[in-house]
Amino acid sequence: MTSVLASIAFRNVLRHGKRTLITALVLTVGLGMFIFFDSLLAGMDRMTIDSMTDYTEASLKVMTPAYRREMRATPLDFGIEDSEGAMERIARAIPEAKAIAPRTAFIGYASNRVDSLPVFGTAVDPRRDAAVFKLAERVAQGRWLSPESAENEIVVGKALAADLGLGVGDWLVLSARAADDTLNADEFRIAGILDVPAQEVAQSGAYLSYQAAKALLGEKLPVTEIAVALPKRATLDAELAESEKAAAAAKQAIPGLEAIPIAEAAKDYMAMRTMKAKYSSMIILVVLLIAGVGIVNTVLMSVFARIKEIGVLRAYGMNPRQIRRLFSLEGMMIGAIGSFGGVAFGGLLVWWSIRWGIPLDKMFGGLDMGSIPIGGVMRGEWHPATMAAGFIFGVVASWVSARIPAKRAGRLEITDALRFV
Amino acid sequence: MGILSLSGITKVYRKGEIEVRALGGVDLEIEKEEFCAIVGPSGSGKTTLLNIIGCLDRPTSGTMRYRDKELRAYGEKELSAYRKEHVSFIFQSYNLIPVLTVAENVEIPLSIAGGMGNPAMRKKALEMLEAVGLADKANRYPRELSGGQEQRVAIARALVKDPVVVLADEPTANLDSRTAEEVVTLMKAMNKSLHTTFVFSTHDRMIMDEAARVVQLHDGMIVKDERRTP
């Protein structure tokens, strides 16, 4: 019986090709756009978190609990004792770690002798830092810090250099409060200018070697943060999970210190991500609602066009439940066609966004969007789970929508149906 | 006693405040293997009577027994089962399902009845199409057939499940006289060869003449019940 119902339903879907196509098209476009935007949002999440891991936060950071509490003020009083020993223990606890590097953050002022601007300074080990972060790869002019250089060198963000009107080779005066709380200042030659999508680096990032930083901030300059880089994973969720796992392992290896995974470092963004996911699920609800109305209409038209047929099938013993199933199947088939089209259309757009990407530089160049990177090329991300969920939701919503006219068909009196002209 | 027995059957339709009495107390016995015509002018209650016999409609009052079982007490499920297994219908406008092929249309009652595999259903449908002379049209669609051919397919569809009773409402009304004669001859042949009871309504004098029994209705009442040798 099911096969004959399916056969009649399928052929009616094909018979009214235009009607089917128009209804399915609504679902195709809606679902396709949902899949595409979901992919772009995932791509944006990936880009933002990647930007954080590549330029500011690493996959995880280790610090003292006291430093963590005061982190915004970047105090130099709560450094990690025996930082080299701690790094060795972390390396043993996280064998998959790509690289580990020490850092000391501080707040200072950069001046061109006329104007001065606040900066987030970071003392780094140039070689080890380049293995953890990608700053060295994003030097637009000049070069990254040289470990061998005897000169006071500094690498600054592009926007900061532009605001101060300085270029590579120019001297910059950097002032900051030293570890002993005295205010020091020194001159640094700009070795390189960074062009990175992270706005905080571009606008106020200043990097100098430990050797140069010690001259400014004191010989006993402590390491305040240990940054750990983990290998990239195919999806952001996998990467976040990996970071959590590594942080737990690091915590066990270095009692008394805190290991902060990227998800925690980016908790504000992660909260925004959760909110975005809610809004994105609202988009699919609207899409399904519109498609549902279309399907109700199409199946209702089908019921009216085939009232006599319903009468004949009832006369031959088909019961109301089977009639309802016939029209529900029809709606479900239209939904399946539309949903399949939506997955294919969405997949095509996702492929395009991954293959070619959206050039943010060209579209939003110079726009400040806080922690959201607005440079480079934004690419989508494959989300098979969203595609599968979209397909299932599309089919189920179509089936539910078709139930309304199907119930009406099931309620028809046989004699009325047979008399219908 | 006949296979179908109707006693005091009335049917009243209500249209707002107005009551229309379609049947006003019909007593009728249908014998097994009968070839019975229900005749009468338009509005005399022929279609209503056939609908009630086929359990497509319920009478307002009266009793109807099929093989000595009272049908009025049946629920929707039992009535569906009765229609599925024991009666078949032939309609004036054929009512074939346009998206199905001729063979698939004939298979429909078997699919609804269930209990038969696809190859067996196809075999039975082809046998029935052979019997009505349309085996070569098995894979055609209804739109590719003439009116007479469509009605022959409808007859094959009605007979494919070996029903006890076939109810036909004006089966020749949409056909020209020559095709109508062919259709009635076919129905009669099936009545003889398959021992199926046929009850049909008609206006057509020529078809009435073919019937072994003619029940005449007027204003919802049987005014004449004539058995004869055609």
Image: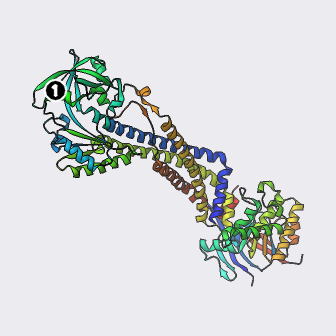
**Location of the C terminus of chain B (image quadrant):** bottom right
The residue at 69%/61% (across/down) is A418
Q: Position of residue B147 (x, y in %)?
A: 82, 58
Compare residues B141 and A218 and report the one nearer the observer. A218
Quadrant housing residue A323:
bottom right
B16 relative to A76 in the view: left or right:
right
How many numbered marks, from 0 up? 1
- Colour approach in the figure: rainbow
The residue at 31%/34% (across/down) is A130
Quadrant housing residue A411:
bottom right
Which element type, helix, strand or loop, lies under badge 1? helix
Compare residues A66 and A127 and report the one nearer the observer. A127
Q: Is residue A133 above or below residue B102?
A: above
Under mark 1, the amino acid is Ala
Q: Is residue A285 above or below residue B164?
A: above
The residue at 33%/36% (across/down) is A54
Residue situated furthest front in the rendering: A148
A106 relative to A320 in the view: left or right:
left
Q: Position of residue A358 (x, y in %)?
A: 46, 32
Res A52 seen here: no
Q: Position of residue A258 (x, y in %)?
A: 21, 46
Residue situated furthest top in the rendering: A114
Q: Residues within 10 Å of mark 1 (few under 14, many from 20)?
A: some
Compare residues A16 and A79 and report the one nearer the observer. A79
A396 relative to B148 in the view: left or right:
left
Q: Position of residue B114 (x, y in %)?
A: 66, 71
**Location of the N terminus of chain B (image quadrant):** bottom right
Label 1 is found on which chain of the structure?
A
Disc 1 marks which residue? A215
Q: Is residue A373 above or below residue A310?
A: above
Res B147 seen here: yes
